[in-house]
Image (cartoon, rainbow, N blue to C red):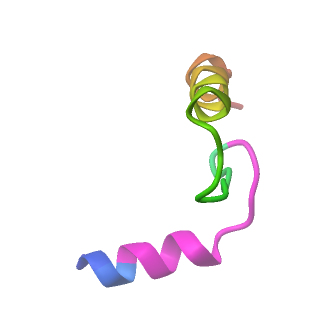
Amino acid sequence: MNEVRMINDLLQQKEGQCIDRKSILVEPMALAVSLVAFANAERR
């Protein structure tokens, strides 16, 4: 699968437990909190 197709597939997915979109302007600490929460989330 090429990179462009992977990016397009990600852009079309809805946000949910596995996808969380962030603004390019997000502060690093706010992003870190989200990443830790994602890492600790239980997958259903």
Residue 1 lies left or right of residue 32; in this view the side is left
x and y, in percent, of residue 3 in the image: 27, 75
| Quadrant in which residue 38 is drawn | top right
Is 26 colored magenta in this rendering? no
Q: Which residues are magenta?
A: 6-17
**Residue at the top extreme, as displayed:** 40
Q: Is residue 1 above or below residue 27?
A: below
Residue at point 68%, 31% (across, down): 30
Query: What is the quadrant of the C terminus in the image?
Result: top right
Instruction: State the residue at coordinates (66%, 58%).
Output: 23
Find out whether residue 13 is within the magenta segment.
yes
Q: Examine the image and state in which quarter residue 36 appears.
A: top right
Q: In the rendered image of this protein, does residue 28 appear above or below residue 12?
A: above
Q: Position of residue 34 (x, y in %)?
A: 66, 31
Say which of 23 and 13 sits in front. 23
Q: Position of residue 9 (x, y in %)?
A: 50, 76
